[in-house]
Image (cartoon, rainbow, N blue to C red):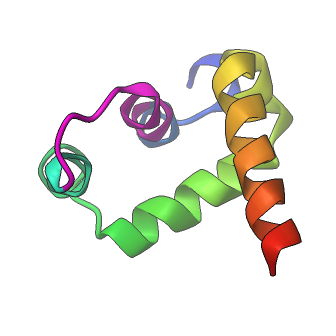
Amino acid sequence: MVSGLSERELAVLALEARQWRTAGAKERAIREELGLSATRYYQLLNGLLDREEALAHDPVLINRLRRIREAKRAER
Protein backbone atom coordinates (compact mmCIF):
# COMPACT_ATOMS: atom_id res chain seq x y z
CA MET A 1 0.00 0.00 0.00
CA VAL A 2 1.92 3.00 -1.31
CA SER A 3 0.93 6.46 -0.08
CA GLY A 4 -1.81 5.08 2.18
CA LEU A 5 -3.99 4.02 -0.77
CA SER A 6 -4.83 0.43 -1.69
CA GLU A 7 -4.06 -1.02 -5.12
CA ARG A 8 -7.76 -0.85 -5.97
CA GLU A 9 -7.94 2.82 -4.94
CA LEU A 10 -4.87 3.61 -7.05
CA ALA A 11 -6.47 1.75 -9.99
CA VAL A 12 -9.67 3.80 -9.60
CA LEU A 13 -7.67 7.04 -9.70
CA ALA A 14 -5.62 5.86 -12.69
CA LEU A 15 -8.75 4.92 -14.61
CA GLU A 16 -10.42 8.23 -13.77
CA ALA A 17 -7.38 10.17 -15.02
CA ARG A 18 -7.57 8.59 -18.49
CA GLN A 19 -9.19 10.26 -21.50
CA TRP A 20 -12.22 8.52 -23.02
CA ARG A 21 -13.08 8.77 -26.70
CA THR A 22 -16.42 6.97 -26.77
CA ALA A 23 -19.43 7.07 -24.49
CA GLY A 24 -19.36 3.48 -23.23
CA ALA A 25 -15.58 3.00 -23.09
CA LYS A 26 -15.19 4.15 -19.49
CA GLU A 27 -18.04 2.00 -18.16
CA ARG A 28 -16.65 -1.00 -20.07
CA ALA A 29 -13.18 -0.41 -18.59
CA ILE A 30 -14.67 -0.15 -15.09
CA ARG A 31 -16.27 -3.58 -15.51
CA GLU A 32 -13.41 -5.28 -17.34
CA GLU A 33 -10.36 -3.82 -15.61
CA LEU A 34 -11.65 -3.31 -12.07
CA GLY A 35 -14.47 -5.84 -11.90
CA LEU A 36 -16.79 -3.20 -10.44
CA SER A 37 -20.23 -1.93 -11.30
CA ALA A 38 -20.32 1.72 -12.36
CA THR A 39 -22.28 2.53 -9.20
CA ARG A 40 -19.64 0.99 -6.90
CA TYR A 41 -16.85 2.66 -8.87
CA TYR A 42 -18.37 6.11 -8.38
CA GLN A 43 -18.98 5.39 -4.69
CA LEU A 44 -15.29 4.54 -4.26
CA LEU A 45 -14.20 7.53 -6.32
CA ASN A 46 -16.40 9.93 -4.34
CA GLY A 47 -14.95 8.61 -1.10
CA LEU A 48 -11.44 9.12 -2.43
CA LEU A 49 -12.14 12.79 -3.14
CA ASP A 50 -12.35 13.40 0.61
CA ARG A 51 -9.07 11.65 1.46
CA GLU A 52 -5.82 13.53 1.94
CA GLU A 53 -3.88 10.50 0.67
CA ALA A 54 -5.64 10.77 -2.70
CA LEU A 55 -4.95 14.51 -2.83
CA ALA A 56 -1.26 13.88 -2.11
CA HIS A 57 -1.13 11.15 -4.78
CA ASP A 58 -2.68 13.19 -7.63
CA PRO A 59 -3.54 16.76 -6.59
CA VAL A 60 -4.49 17.95 -10.09
CA LEU A 61 -7.00 15.13 -10.63
CA ILE A 62 -8.49 15.32 -7.13
CA ASN A 63 -8.86 19.10 -7.18
CA ARG A 64 -10.49 18.96 -10.64
CA LEU A 65 -12.94 16.29 -9.50
CA ARG A 66 -13.70 18.22 -6.29
CA ARG A 67 -14.53 21.33 -8.36
CA ILE A 68 -16.85 19.29 -10.59
CA ARG A 69 -18.55 17.75 -7.54
CA GLU A 70 -19.05 21.15 -5.91
CA ALA A 71 -20.47 22.61 -9.12
CA LYS A 72 -22.99 19.76 -9.35
CA ARG A 73 -23.97 20.26 -5.72
CA ALA A 74 -24.46 23.97 -6.32
CA GLU A 75 -26.81 23.22 -9.24
CA ARG A 76 -29.16 21.27 -6.98
- Measuring 78% from the left and 31% from the top, which residue is drawn there? 63
What range of the chain is rendered magenta?
11-23
Residue 39, given in percent of the width and then of the height, sits at: 41, 74
The image shows residue 75, relative to residue 47, as above or below, that is below
Reply above or below: 47 against 16: below
Residue drawn where x is 68% and y is 47% of the image:
48
Residue 17 falls inside the magenta stretch: yes
- The answer to which image quadrant residue 40 occupies is bottom left
Above/below status of 47 relative to 8: below
Q: State the residue in front, 7 or 41.
A: 41
Could you tell whether 30 is left or right of 10 in the image?
left
The residue nearer to you, when weighing 58 against 18, is 18
**Count of numbered labels shown in the rendering:** 0
Asked which quadrant contains residue 62, the reply is: top right
Q: Position of residue 69 (x, y in %)?
A: 74, 56
- Residue shown at the point (80%, 57%) measured from the top left: 71
**Residue 3 falls inside the magenta stretch:** no
Q: Quadrant of the C terminus?
A: bottom right
Give left or right: position of 73 versus 13. Answer: right
Identified at 75% across, 19% down, the residue is: 59
On the rendered structure, is 52 left or right of 46?
Answer: right
